[in-house]
Every structure is written in structure tokens, then in C-alpha cells.
Amino acid sequence: MLRFDNSPKKSTNLSLNSKVLEMAREMGMNVSQTVDTLLAAEVRRRYWEQWNAENKDAVAEYNARMALDGLPLAKYRTF
């Protein structure tokens, strides 16, 4: 799992829609925290999307092997 919890903050410049920014400020939103949270979620989503694409063949082979041979230690399962 990708975790960004205790990473230090870094200043950056963003260009945002002025009307959206104005409304967010009127609502008392913490724009920096909101953008940080949403960007982290998008980075996680894209990371796993890329990981799945890069590993799809290995995952398919593993699933096929499990379907054919079953789980390696299945005889020891108690449930």
C-alpha cells in the first residue's frame, strides 16, 4: 500500500479555476489539504492501474496455475 501520511509538505504553485477557488474559500475549505488528499488518491489509483497493467501476465499465469493445481497448502487449511 502506498502511504504518504508523514511525508513533509512542499510549497508549490498551482493554477486553479478562480471561481472554484473563490467558492472553496467562502465555504471555509482548506484548499491545500483538499488538493493534497485528492492528489494522493489519484496517485494511488494510477500507481495500481499501472502495476496491474505491468503485471497482468504474471497475475493471469498465477490464477491459471491456482485453478489447475489448487492452493499449495490447501490440505493444511482448517476452514
Image (tube, rainbow, N blue to C red):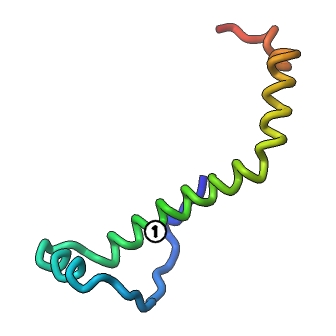
| 71 in relation to 12, above or below | above
Left or right, 10 with respect to 51, comes to left
Tell which of 59 and 1 is nearer to you: 59
| Residue lying at 79% horizontally and 28% vertically, measured from the top left | 63
Occupied quadrant, residue 65 = top right
The residue indicated by pointer 1 is 39
Tell which of 70 and 6 is nearer to you: 70
User: Where does residue 25 sit, x and y in percent of width and height?
Assistant: 17, 79
Occupied quadrant, residue 23 = bottom left
Occupied quadrant, residue 34 = bottom left
User: Where does residue 74 sit, x and y in percent of width and height?
Assistant: 79, 13
User: Where does residue 79 sit, x and y in percent of width and height?
Assistant: 65, 8
Left or right, 75 with respect to 38, comes to right
Specify the farthest residue to the left: 26
Left or right, 42 with respect to 36, comes to right
User: Where does residue 37 sit, x and y in percent of width and height?
Assistant: 40, 66
Numbered circles on residues, count: 1
Q: Residues within 10 Å of mark 1 (few under 14, many from 20)?
A: few
| 37 in relation to 45, above or below | below
Type of the residue with mark 1? Leu
| Residue lying at 20% horizontally and 81% vertically, measured from the top left | 19
| 72 in relation to 41, above or below | above
Secondary structure type for disc 1: helix
| Residue lying at 20% horizontally and 75% vertically, measured from the top left | 24
